[in-house]
Amino acid sequence: MLNNALIKKFESILGKNNCFTEPEDTMCYSYDAFSAEPVQPDIVVKPQNEEQIKYIINICKDENIPIVTRGAGTNLSGGTVPVKKGCVLLTTCLNKILEINENDMYAVVEAGVVTANLANAAIKKGLFYPPDPGSVNISTIGGNVAENAGGLRGLKYGVTKDYLMGVDFYDMDGNYVKGGGKTVKLVTGLNLPGLMISSEGLLGIMTKFVLKLIPKPKFSKSMLVIYDDVIKACETVSEIIAAKILPATLELLDSFTIKTVEEATKIGLPTNADALLLIELDGHEAQVLEDFEAVKDICIKLGGNIKVAETAQERDKLWEARRKALSSLARLKPTLILEDATVVRSKIPEMMKAINDIKNKYNLVIGTFGHAGDGNLHPTILTDKRDKEEMVRVEKAIDEIFAKALELDGTLSGEHGVGFAKAKYLEMEVGSGTIEYMKKLKKGVDPQNLLNPHKMGL
């Protein structure tokens, strides 16, 4: 608990209007998008510039106060829950797009820039920033880097790490550190952008980024494919990839998710379908049209019923079906647990079957959707954390889902990070030696363990 003298120290740097200690204010920062018991921080601070961040670090270091850096708080693994209380540092006021360079195709942005704002600014220059997390309209670039956010275009365009060229951050001594830069090639020194991506705020407070932009695709074509067998839909995904075709988007919705989205949106989805695939191809028109016909043939061969979007309005409607999946499922039960199991793409049918078997075994409500093209499924458990008996079954189901993902050459997380939600599973994937190396690294740059402590089990 902070005393009045310490609070006045923060206020002397930031002003009273940018420091919050009242319970009704700090409550808003006691949780994120992951379902967990909230933990209220002692103080929430809203720096207006990098110089103030340096002073905040100095106070926290001197007084042994944990710091959790937070953007929009949309992460789904508890990464921004202040489990040791202390100070939550908001980056939302560092929200300037400092440069979009058309000739060299990069952007320089502050940590609090909303992802969609950068994407829209790039489009106006004829450029493209592809990472497209589901929370694109509210998530921040700083959070995207901290969690290595992915999204609907990950299959063809990759995730945030594929666009991170440079990063500026402050270490726990208040030193300014600059990694990477604006050149396409850069191999000077250690790869600090590579170190900071997915670091979840454990290694420094990131303030500024250089991000790669690419030319905006000139042509795109979308289709919705309806299946009466979800496994056939998954086999379609594997066949498209095996045919060496890379759609920009290849998304899956299972029957439960389809019905739930339709109930919420009334956009005309086929509620008797067992699965849907949303497929979009983009690039040069001739190549897109050739690939589109090949994809259609694969879909039809595996029993798919195709509906092609002929207009921009029809395309937007198809995308709405996918974008509303999480929010539609969240309407049904008090507690939503969205998992992030990811497997190699040829194992998607096997993973989907395992999720359905686990759902039936533990008698749970699970809707599954996700980025099937990159093997990234989101089995979403709908429950009520007040029901202790059901939560025991939920825990067992999650254990089995992760174990199956690893058995299928997969990973615990394709894009949502580890936070504290998956910390207990991390050793299953990386091994004890890797955990020890991570602990040494963390201790070397943060010996007091003040930067987002207790995340990833570090």
Image: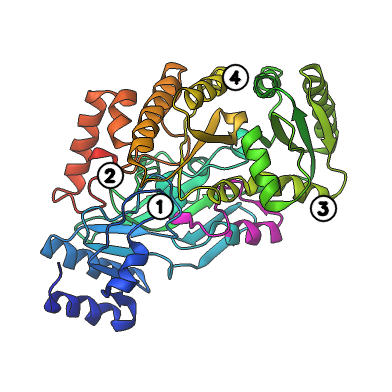
Tell me where the magenta segment starts and ends, as one range.
118-142
Give the class, few, some or many, for how many residues have Cα within 10 Å of label 4's Cα (few <14, many ≥20): many
Label drawn at residue 313: 3
In space, the residues marked 3 and 4 are separated at their CA atoms by: 32 Å
Marks 2,4: beta carbons within 8 A: no
Give the class, few, some or many, for how many residues have Cα within 10 Å of label 1's Cα (few <14, many ≥20): many
Residue 254: tell me if it is visible.
no
Q: Label 2 sits on what residue type?
A: Lys
Q: Secondary structure at mark 1?
A: strand
Q: Label 1 sits on what residue type?
A: Val
Marks 3,4: beta carbons within 8 A: no
Q: Quadrant of residue 51?
A: bottom left
The residue labelled by disc 2 is 455
Q: Which is more N-terminal, label 4 or label 3? A: 3
Q: Quadrant of residue 417?
A: top left
Q: Secondary structure at mark 3?
A: helix
In space, the residues marked 1 and 2 are separated at their CA atoms by: 21 Å
In space, the residues marked 2 and 3 are separated at their CA atoms by: 43 Å
Residue 225: tell me if it is visible.
yes
Q: Is residue 25 above or below residue 339?
A: below
Picture coordinates of residue 30, whole percent (x, y):
32, 60
The residue labelled by disc 4 is 349
Q: Label 4 sits on what residue type?
A: Pro
The residue labelled by disc 1 is 167
Q: Label 3 sits on what residue type?
A: Gln
